[in-house]
Image (cartoon, rainbow, N blue to C red):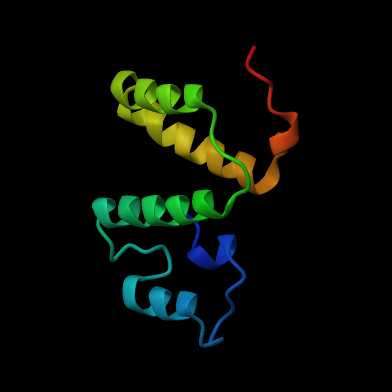
Amino acid sequence: MTKPVGYYTSSTINDGSLLESLKEQYGQTFEGMTRREKLYLISAIAIQLCDQAPGRCRDEIYTVGHQINSSLPLHDREGLVEALTNQIRYGQSLSVEELPMKQ
């Protein structure tokens, strides 16, 4: 059983926010959305957050992304989305200054 959207966000009941409106339209766990629609929203949000993050990706990360999408089974790719989301939200990440330098 999945938790309601409010568990993960700062929305509160009857706060008039976009999240409140989305919950009313699609349900507390967005059960009124298809799998494809949820994946699209994940993609759209991730692209925008990536664009706002400082620095740039190392070239090797683009290769890693291709390897993940071409080699890993669906359940592992879904697991990676969950793991990376938790690491971004609750974990530590290297700063741009800490990235290893290419020789």
| Residue at horizontal 31 percent and vertical 53 percent from the top | 40
Q: How many marks?
A: 0
Q: Is residue 31 left or right of residue 85?
A: left
Quarter of the view holding residue 91: top right
- Most foreground residue, 53 or 13: 53
* Residue placed furthest toward the top: 103
* Residue placed furthest toward the front: 103
Q: In the rendered view of the protein, which quadrant contains the C terminus?
A: top right
Where in the figure is residue 68, as x and y percent of width and height? Answer: 38, 24
Does any portion of residue 49 appear in the rendered image? Answer: yes
Does any portion of residue 93 appear in the rendered image? Answer: no
| Residue at horizontal 38 percent and vertical 79 percent from the top | 24
Quarter of the view holding residue 88: top right
| Residue at horizontal 74 percent and vertical 34 percent from the top | 97
Q: Is residue 1 left or right of residue 11?
A: left
Where in the figure is residue 61, as x and y percent of width and height? Answer: 49, 26
- Most foreground residue, 53 or 102: 102
Where in the figure is residue 60, as x and y percent of width and height? Answer: 49, 21
| Residue at horizontal 33 percent and vertical 77 percent from the top | 25
Quarter of the view holding residue 10: bottom right
Where in the figure is residue 72, as x and y percent of width and height? Answer: 35, 21
Classify 32 as above or below 42: below
